[in-house]
Amino acid sequence: MKGRVFDLQRCCVHDGPGIRTTVFLAGCPLRCAWCHNPEAFSGDTARSIESREVLNEVLEDRAFYEATGGGLTVSGGEPLLQPAFVRELLTLARAAGLHTCVQTSGAVDEGSLLAVLDVVDLLQFDLKHADPARHEVLTGKKNERIFSNAALAAARAKQVDFRVPIVPGLTDEPESLERTAAFVRSLGTRALHLVPYQRTYLGKYARLGLEARCANVAPPTDEALVAHRALLSRHGVDAVVVA
Ligand code: SF4
């Protein structure tokens, strides 16, 4: 089966445990103001490629995965817009002995999520903002389905890491972090992964002729991240900052 892939990056160290190869799939239902991968929805650089062909490329770094506990991560865009392809690719990867990870916005129908859960070792699930109206302003969609899918994932997935992008002034309001903490605790989880906003992606927008809505936003300071962790801790959640 073919999937629409716009990038494949080797030797990734922030997309799950160990050293990994991350495969980026085209298409996304959201338009996050801080999106680092605008080529996911421009579609210009995507190619159609067979799952076996993707796996063969991923397997070239098998020695690194074995040495570090790494493996294959599927990201995007929103990979679960192509659930059959993701399922086939991860099934092949697991048969080859690889650890599998999927990064999702959760903004997909329930069936697309359920279609892959049994072949995912680690699901990295974004909770971008707790307030539905604010979420819509920031991403183009409300968050009710995302939060219901998060509950489904918490109940059914082998392992879920919930992640919050920390974009100063947009996603880091104390009320939103507190609500997100209460939500993950209601799912029986006491951990959150904070992903600090970075500006390294801005050149992509210039190359694609797109306007970057967060061009003037600075990354969070170390002090701000410490404060967010302290707030979350007061609400019963251990937050880890993803470097
Ligand atoms: S979900 Fe990810 S790929 Fe999609 S718009 Fe948001 S940041 Fe970009």
Image: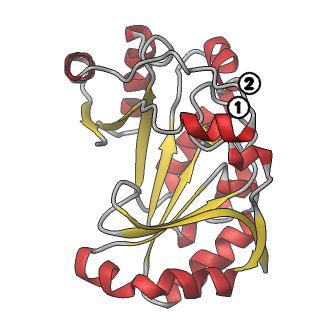
- Indicate how the structure is coloured in the image: secondary structure
- Cα distance in 3D space between marks 2 and 1: 6 Å
Answer left or right for 21 relative to 193.
Answer: right
Q: Is residue 109 visible?
A: no
Q: 101 and 32: which one is in front? A: 32
Instruction: Point out the tag, 2 or 1, that comes first from the N-terminus.
Output: 1
Which quarter of the rendering shows the C terminus? top left
Q: Is residue 175 above or below residue 117?
A: above
Residue 157 location (% of width, % of height): 49, 58
Q: Are marks 2 and 1 in contact (CB under 8 Å)?
A: yes
Q: What type is the residue that disc 2 sits on?
A: Gly
Residue 205 location (% of width, % of height): 65, 35
Answer left or right for 111 relative to 58.
Answer: right
Q: Is residue 85 above or below residue 237?
A: below
Which residue is at 32% across, 87% downward?
63
Q: Which residue is mark 2?
A: 140
- Disc 1, ligand 1: is the CB inside 8 Å? yes
Q: Is residue 177 visible?
A: yes
Q: At numbered mark 1, what does the secondary structure look like: helix, strand or loop?
A: loop
Which quarter of the rendering shows the N terminus? bottom right
Q: Which residue is mark 1?
A: 31
Ligand 1 positioned in quadrant: top right
Q: Is residue 6 above or below residue 139?
A: below
Q: At numbered mark 2, what does the secondary structure look like: helix, strand or loop?
A: loop
Residue 160 location (% of width, % of height): 43, 51
Q: 46 and 72: which one is in front? A: 46
Which residue is at 26% across, 23% downward?
225
